Amino acid sequence: MKIDILTLFPDMFNNVFEESIIKRAQELKKVEINIINFREYTIDPHNKVDDTPYGGGAGMVLTCQPIFDCVNSIRTNDSVVILLTPDGEVYKQKKAYQLAEKKHLIIICGHYEGFDERIRSICDLEISIGDYVLTGGEIAAMVLVDSITRLLPGVITEDSHINDSFNDNLLDYPTYTKPRIYNGMEVPEVLLSGDHKKIAEYRYQESLKKTKERRPDLLEK
Ligand code: 6GU
């Protein structure tokens, strides 16, 4: 998979993808991540990428030209163009799985007070990462890249994400490792039993219990 991220703040991405699983995914050529400063595409003599809003109001608005020209120069028939904006569809694990199937993602980070409404016309998808407002789409882009990359075949073993929270709309079950007793707290006996059927049933019940307590909304789906 190839992921192009369009941003005015490329330095925000320094080192974020240079650690741990995303670093390894790039080394294994499972994903190629490019950070593109779309200011390089402006035709404005002063390198401007924003302007005042028609009708008045506070703040500066991203103009169409640099983003249109940048997207048009990199998009192919395989591209999915994603706009990151707080008024987009709220991002869920299901969408991460869908996007992990794609060949090429183009992720546009909105910024400042907003962007020209006509930018939406070149986007296939508008995504928000939750009901709060960020100063820009950069951190949301990092969230998308992380959550999608870990799902790509060969990046982590499938076993590691098949039981993730949110698969089947259930939160993850509790896990334990050595020692068996720590500060007086014991590992549940069933996990030491070696009875895999019993263990699976225990884990399912714990997932269900935790989801009922913490996220009853998930069970309604
Ligand atoms: Cl994608 N962008 C901004 N600016 N704020 C957000 C967001 C995105 N998702 C949640 N809040």
Image: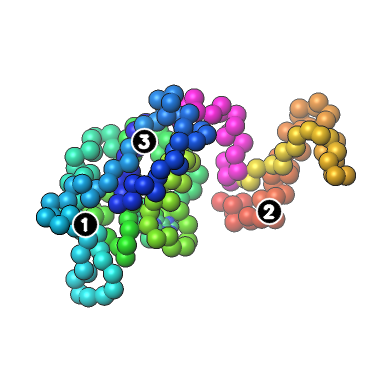
Please name which of the two marks, 2 or 1, marks the residue nearer to the observer: 1
Residue 32 x/y as whole percent: 36, 31
Verify whether residue 157 appears in magenta.
yes
Disc 3: which residue: 33
- Binning the other alpha carbons within 10 Å of mark 1 as few (below 14), some (14 to 19) or many (20 upward) gives many
Pointer 2 with pointer 3, Cβ within 8 A: no
Which residue position holds label 2? 212
Ligand 1 quadrant assignment: bottom left
Mark 2 residue type: Lys
- Residue 77, x across and y down, in percent: 24, 34
**Rounded to the nearest whole Å, what is the CA distance between mark 2 and mark 3?**
38 Å
In this view, the residue in front, 76 or 136, is 136
Q: Which residue is mark 1?
A: 49
Horizontal side, residue 194 vs residue 163: left or right: right
Magenta segment: 152-169
Q: Residue at x 23, y 44 (%)?
A: 71
Q: Is mark 1 within 8 Å of ligand 1?
A: no
N-term mark: 3 or 1 = 3
Q: Mark 2 near ligand 1 (CB under 8 Å)?
A: no
Above or below, 34 relative to 39: above
Q: Earlier in the sequence, mark 2 or mark 1?
A: 1
Amino acid bearing label 3: Ile
